[in-house]
Image (cartoon, rainbow, N blue to C red):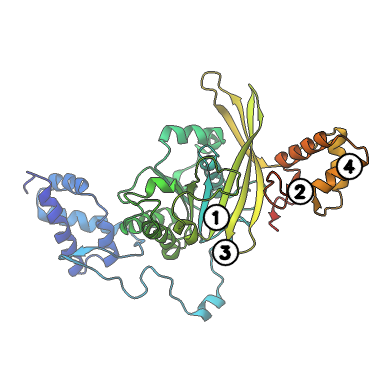
Amino acid sequence: MSDDNGKKIVDLQPALVAQLFVEGKVSRQEADILSYYSPDRWQRIYKQAKDADELKAFLENLTARYRKPIQKARIQLRGGASLPEIGAGRPVYNLLTLLRSEPSTPKDIVPRLLPAGGAIGLAGEFGSLKSYLLLDLFLHLVTGEEWLGLPVPQMPVLLLDRENKPRKLYERAICLGAGKYTQMANEDFPFVVIGDLRYSLDDPRFVDEVTHHIEVVGAGGPVVVGLDSMVDFLGSADENNNSEMHQCASHVRELCNVNGATVITLCHVPTGTGGTRRQKIRGASAVAYALDVVIQATTTVVVKDEAQTTYRIKLAQQKNRDGDPSEMSILAHFADKDKETGRGTRTLFEPAIPVYKQDSESVAIREALDDGEWHLASELVSALVEAEKGKRSTLQSRLGDMRETGEVETDREPVQGSSYKVRLSQTDLWTTKQ
């Protein structure tokens, strides 16, 4: 066999795959798996093979090792695109069959936060700890350990990460305590990271490529997929173009529909909008429209000193097709700072429990709100001033501090000159929006 250039193998490979398919030696799906080999990979195989028979034998041995065909069949055979069989890659079932056997897919990945099988967007400004939070969640999913005190199913995870280099991912995983898992076998710790893909979201082949990886990682079961971040997978699509972003978002949804996967995409918001009413997913509205759940992450610094930095992360659902939007608060502790880099070498996420101040004004506000009802903030402060519980400016400042720490919640974003209501935060981890 000649090995003078790579072009010949590009032409030869589809012909051999087609021949094996026509002869019935490989299935349509097995042929599709073979099509994922890149031209460079085929060139190396071609150079090592002595003749066409040896190459053909290699193909047959290769396909024999694949027991789980991918769900969509889009291959080029004899110059024409093959058509999937009816129902291929799509959930087709009889309703009575469904009623007789409850689906194996869990109802929720995280109760009231992440519904299983949905397309979810986690949005926030740069530096709002979205990637850290996703990595921490994935480490708990793959081990089945509770996350923030909430039960989560033990599931394989697939992280598609074009944003973080391996070194950064390593450092973050070590900070989160993942070093204790290094003695486990790979098959017992199904957490797969792919730093790049051949195709982007603007290409229909993106769904095929990721589907292949989902099948391998999940071994036929449900998988949670993370995209960090969505903008890095747009390819040539313009994030401000609704039609182009609709196509990209539809491919995210297709991953859920075809594979039953839960897909979490990390999204950016316009700079300076974090924590305001204007905070929304950056770019065209088609993205937010296509997602089942949109969660806005707002991060503020609570403690910052030489030893550690503590952030409060507020996760507020702007949209939830499965129920009423809810919100929760998390504390992220970055402790044991490295003196040279200034980075925390130990990271812990935990539910945010309000730290109660014991000054007289805070105690008075707490007692006035002890009934659990909503009170107009202005009327509350005026009543406390009249009862000689403190000065107006001090009471307003303490009320603002209690909002920041999460001890007190508001019915709307406080805006200068407008009225809003306050009450003590609910003791439950989750709070349903009014």
N-term mark: 4 or 1: 1
Quarter of the rendering occupied by the C terminus: bottom right
Q: Height in image: 229 above or below 220?
A: above
Q: Secondary structure at mark 3?
A: loop
Q: 356 or 98: nearer the eye?
A: 356
- Pointer 4 residue: 384
Q: Amino acid at mark 2?
A: Ser
Residue 89: where, in percent of width, then height?
38, 67
Q: Are marks 4 and 2 in contact (CB under 8 Å)?
A: no
Of discs 4 and 2, which sits in the foreground? 4
- Image coordinates of residue 382 in percent, x first then y, are 86, 44
Q: Which of the two labelled residues, at mark 1 and mark 2, occupies the earlier sequence position?
A: 1
Q: Residue furthest front?
A: 417
The kind of residue on which mark 4 rests is Leu
Contact (CB < 8 A) between labels 4 and 1?
no
Going 23% across and 49% down the picture, which residue do you hit? 38
Q: Earlier in the sequence, mark 3 or mark 1?
A: 1
Residue 321 is marked as: 3
Q: Secondary structure at mark 2?
A: loop
Q: Real-space Cα distance between discs 3 and 2?
A: 25 Å
Give the residue type that dot 1 points to. Answer: Val
Q: Which mark is residue 425?
A: 2
Q: Circle 1: is it few (<14), some (14-19), or many (20+) Cα within 10 Å?
A: many
Answer few, some or many: residues within 10 Å of disc 3's Cα (few below 14, many 20 plus, some between 14 and 19). few
Answer whether labels 3 and 4 touch (C-beta < 8 Å). no
Inspect the image, locate mark 3, and give the three-letter code of the amino acid beneath it: Arg
Mark 3 and mark 1 in contact? Answer it, CB < 8 Å.
no
